[in-house]
């Protein structure tokens, strides 16, 4: 969200924003309970669903950092 907010604010001025966001990404590697994510969850002593939700809380609890009225800089 920070990268998107910065891009929306400074994009019209010609500034490009690149970000690196480490963490679990919903791919079969992490999302499959029998895959790597399931093994990490087991090592952490929790079931896969609890592990995944601790990495990615539901979007309804995430703060909104960008103003909904702000114009988009580029598609």
Image: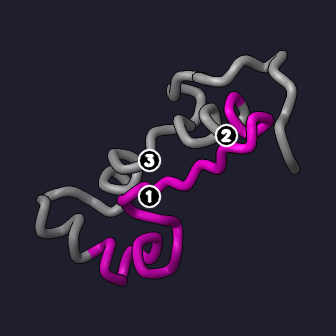
Q: Are marks 3 and 2 in contact (CB under 8 Å)?
A: no
Seen from the viewer's position, the closer of residues 25 and 36 is: 25
Name the residue at 60% across, 23% down.
64
Can you identify the residue that label 2 sits on? 7
Give left or right: position of 39 versus 60: left
The residue segment tinted magenta is 9-38
Give left or right: position of 10 versus 44: right
Q: Are marks 3 and 1 in contact (CB under 8 Å)?
A: no
User: Can you name the residue that lies furthest to the front here?
Assistant: 14
Seen from the viewer's position, the closer of residues 63 and 19 is: 19
Name the residue at 33% across, 50% down.
50
Predominant SS of the magenta segment: loop
Quadrant assignment for the N terminus: top right
Nearer to us of marks 3 and 1 is 1
Can you identify the residue that label 1 sits on? 20
Q: Is residue 24 above or below residue 56?
A: below
Q: Secondary structure at mark 1?
A: loop
Labelled disc at residue 56: 3
């Amino acid at each position: 969200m920070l990268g998107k907010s910065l891009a929306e604010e400074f994009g019209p001025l010609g500034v490009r924003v690149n970000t690196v966001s480490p963490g679990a990404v919903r791919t079969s590697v992490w999302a499959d309970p029998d895959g790597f994510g399931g093994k990490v969850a087991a090592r952490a002593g929790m079931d896969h669903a609890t592990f995944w939700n601790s990495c990615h809380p539901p979007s309804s609890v995430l703060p909104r950092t960008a103003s909904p009225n702000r114009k988009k800089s580029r598609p």
